[in-house]
Image (cartoon, grey):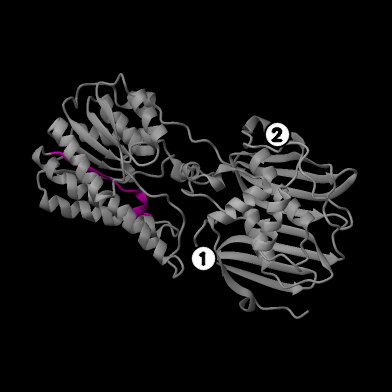
Amino acid sequence: MTVMSSAEVEGLIRFSLDDLSLFSEASQDRNPLHLSGDYARKTPYGEPVVFGVLGGIACLGRLIDRPGLTLSNAVLEFPSPMFVGIDYRIETTDLSPEQASARIYDGDRVLLKASFRFTKGSAAPAERTAAKAPVRLDPSETVEEELVEGFTVSKSYWPAWGRLGALYERFGLMRKGVEDIHLAALMWCSYLVGMELPGRRALFSRLAIDFQEPSRAWGSHPAWEARVVSFDKRFDLVRIEARLSSGESLLARAELRSFVRRDLPPLSIEAVESLVPRSDALKGKVGLVIGASRGLGAAIASGLALGGCTVFANFLKSEPEARRLKNELTSATGEIILLQGDGSELRWCEEAKRSILRDYKRLDFLVCSACPALLPLWLDSTAVTRINEYVTHSLALASVPMSVFLGALAENCGCCVIISSAAVNDPPAEWPHYVSAKQAVEGLAKVAAVEHNTVNFLIARPPRLVTDLTNTPLGRQGAIRPERVAAKIVKHMAGRSTDRQVETLDSADW
């Protein structure tokens, strides 16, 4: 076979929510990172992530036909997440009848790498029996103490054969050397990592699977065993060896790697209070925090309420977190009042203003803390639309509230706080959208100060914080708790130390 150049087999692929649902139903991998918008929104990814194995299946479907050959080995690596609704470039290279490779790109950034090997023959058809034992309906909550060398899990596994067939057709696997048994084993790997070990907090990193003698069929008693080989606490990376069998026959042997996402520690009101003790310093003051349910916004709202301020805490979707914040501050000298809505919408801001001024007759503080989910992007033609959309949304979360509330602040010589980032001074290559948005908001505040000369403006550029946006093994390195930054900001709001109308708290100030 002639080696084909990548240019001859380049194309685009776009995953849909229906694709994710189909894969989940077929594999019985129900990990919420892939299926729940609410769950994914509280991770660094902000939205559901495409199953890594689904990306590998899509690559198999783009290979040339391989009559008389059957898949014997697959290696999939997932260096970056994929999302629905984005056109990715898929590139396949057929090196020989027995060997092929594939990659999925976002611009020039590799999201998935795959290699496949084939051998002569054909796999025996699987016995499509119904499951005789239930698989998990909810992913396990494996704790770090269990991820020690030798920890073993043994169970049975059945895919949903009818949905597997639909997946087989959806991605065009006919005549590609891929049979039911191969697809079922690949989906077993996804199920194992996403539902069993490590389970809910898994972020699949790598899969290498060897299929055994093709004549061995998936029978009526499929069983698997998985054993932890190692757990690297520096990167929260677990390595697993697994075997899939049918009766006495070994069907597949796999080596799996997965990051284990840590649960983010909840906001500590006690930590805020240790830095901003309860007082009446802000009694009679009224504040509005846009994006107050989580992270730095929640910590700032806490500090203001502990100082006696009446705080309108805005949130869009994180109602459980917002209610927790309110409940934990019932004994504060101030008060938390929840305001649900989109702070980037003009109509919502105007209604919030009417409500606040009707009931409290004033507004002293406006804190613009909300920010869209932050994913890496590069200044590339394939990503420029997403960059522009991010900047527009991020800017609106400050520009709209400022346009509505600055007049009320001016009447009381109030303070407007803009949460920027230390990244404006040291911009990472993968954050053109984030840095542009933060610099735009800073510029907006400086111009607004000219128009509203009785309003004080505070631009805060905190360093990397431990929040949902940074809750990854590398993102947490060197990050500081938001309570510490919030305390500094609240103290500044309570008693300005300079006569400058626009002041910047830079990374060195923390």
Residue 363 appears anywhere in the view: no
Q: Assess whether residue 424 is covered by the magenta stretch.
A: yes
**What's the magenta region?**
414-426
Residue 236 horizontal/vertical position (percent): 60, 41
Between 507 and 128, which is closer to the camera in this rendering? 128
Indicate yes or no whether the magenta region holds residue 201: no
Q: In this view, does 46 lie above or below 103?
A: above
Which quadrant would the N terminus be assigned to in this image?
Answer: bottom right
Q: Which mark is residue 87?
A: 1
Against 208, is 356 above or below? above
Residue type at mark 2 is Val
- Indicate the quadrant where residue 246 lies: top right
Residue that sits furthest to the top in the current view: 331
Instruction: Judge the density around disc 1: few (<14), some (14-19), many (≥20) Cα neighbours within 10 Å.
Output: some
Horizontally, residue 414 falls left or right of residue 33, namely left
- Find the distance from the CA under tag 2 to the CA under tag 1: 40 Å
Q: How many numbered circles are shown?
A: 2
| Amino acid carrying mark 1 in the image | Asp
Residue at 29 percent across and 54 percent down: it is: 395
The tag earlier along the polypeptide, 2 or 1, is: 1
Q: Quadrant of residue 104?
A: bottom right
| Nearer mark to the viewer, of 2 and 1 | 1
Dot 1: what SS? Answer: loop
Residue located 49% across and 49% down the image: 45
| Residue 450 appears left or right of 67 | left
Q: Which residue is drawn at 75% across and 35% down?
A: 153
Q: Residue 24 appears at what percent x and percent y?
A: 63, 48
- In the image, is residue 393 above or below residue 378? above
Tag 2 residue: 148
Number of the label disc, if any, that sits on residue 3 = none
Where residue 134 appears, as percent x and y from the top left, is 72, 36
Compare residues 78 and 125 and report the one nearer the observer. 125
